[in-house]
Amino acid sequence: MASEANAAELLEAYRVAIRRKSPKSLETWQKNRTVMPGGVGSRFRMSDPFPMVAKEASGARLWDVDGNEYLDCMLAFSTMILGNADPIVQEAVEKVLPRGSTYALCHDREYEFAKLFCDMVPGADQLAFVNSGTEATLYATRLARATTRRSLIGKFEGGYHGTHDFLAVSIQKPRIDPAACGPIEDPVTVPDYPGMVEDAWKNTIVLPYNHPAASDKIRRYGSQLAAVIVEPVQGGGGSIPAKREFLQELRKVTEEVGALLIFDEVITGFRLARGGGQEFYGVIPDLCTFGKVSGGGMPIGAVAGKRDFLRLMEFDTNPTGTILVGGTFNGNPITVAAGFATLKQLNSNPGIYARLNAMGDRYRKELNEFAQKNDFPAMAVGAGSIIWMHTVRGPVNSNRDLRGENVNASVGLKLLYRLNNLHISSYHGFLSAAHSDGDITRLIEIHKDAMWELRKHGIW
Ligand code: PMP
């Protein structure tokens, strides 16, 4: 094994090579920093040693401002499932633009999009459009509170549901500092970031993901619990799929205590299957939230569900008893055009999910076989076209299972991905219909080469 000093020296050499490869990106980001805090539009765009600065993207490729070409397995955090700059989606947007980009009114193109959305998602009788996944989970939990007249929400350790104060708790901490997060069977609620309103996050109880003790805790808080929210595959938490029996049990126990079950399908929606995670797992929630893929590259969020549970959004018939939902840009015509053009293609191309999921399965199979054969403590995870590789031997059932990760190897891998022209986020990767089998071969090779490189230097 390399000493810490040698490891630090090697990682620094990779950073130097990245700076050399992308001087314009570095310069652009530094300029951004003078007028934007951190120089990035979201903390998740920050990366080591500095953020990627995009120039353009097409299909399964993305180019930075230095002209470097990358294999794109980030796809705007899963959004671009058809590939970047899909011509049919672009044409649909160009066609509506001359009619005005937003009216903040009903318009004659919402119906066909909402109808197709509901036809595709088994648990969606109706839906409300908003502008982001964060808004969708905020409104879904508000709706659950108003409907059940209860105050508590259950969320899982490692689960990411956006940035609002109710749910941005116990996301990263359980992996980094499990001792601060209580016993695995009964985790405590830990706000991950400063500035969160205590009265908000204290109304959130935290549950262990993929763990039978979750049911005990749900029963314990049963009469106060408005809803339990869960990602069918934890995305930002490390691409960790739920076990089918775990979701089935959640369905049963939430019904038993009278709490709503919310699937946060912001990543899994229209990605794992035509009907998202609920179709993939065969478990139908009461409410579900969407974003990303469903907007075809334009800003979107959606709260969908069974008609009974959306009743308190029927503003016209119940003006005082309904929840507050607003949004100037909700269902704007550009998003509706891009989203509809995307869903139509996904809906009318029945082989698309079999192919996407087979590519993800190939990634996991080949890399896990390789890791095992060569004794790398590594685990390729994910479900369907959601992919990632962790530097632990596994199994990985929750983000507490990541606490033994090889930190130097994790950092080194991400730097080597970038050096070798793979664009992928920090805890999840995604495949698109534009990826070829050759792209998957290249993706796997980049991983294997990086693993040998780190082994050669005694880091792994
Ligand atoms: N829920 C999940 C599962 C997500 O992955 C995300 C974003 N990565 C969100 C909610 C928040 O979505 P947005 O970034 O659109 O606010």
Image: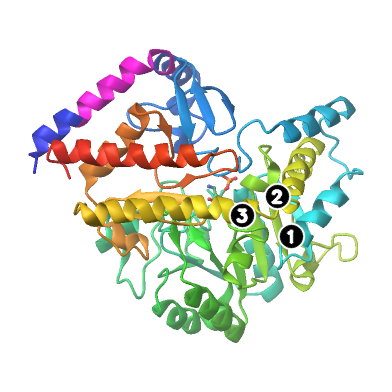
User: For numbered disc 2, what is the local secondary structure?
Assistant: helix
- 414 relative position to 236: left or right: left
Q: Residue at x 61, y 77 (%)?
A: 259
- Magenta span covers which residues? 11-25
Quadrant of the image containing the N terminus: top left
Earlier-in-chain disc, 2 versus 1: 1
Residue 424's x, y, as percent? 43, 38
Q: Is residue 289 above or below residue 188?
A: above
Question: Residue 453's x, y, as percent?
Answer: 21, 35
Label of residue 353 in the image: 3
Q: Quadrant of the C terminus?
A: top left
Q: Marks 1 and 2: in contact by CB < 8 Å?
A: yes
**Residue assigned mark 1:** 120
Residue type beneath disc 3: Tyr
Looking at the image, residue 296 sits to the left or right of residue 151; the answer is right
**Label 2, on which residue?**
346
Say which element carries label 3.
Answer: helix
Q: Of label 3 and label 2, which has the lower sequence position?
A: 2
In the figure, residue 48 lies in which quadrant?
Answer: top left
Amino acid type indicated by mark 1 = Met
Type of amino acid under label 2: Leu
Q: Secondary structure at mark 1?
A: helix
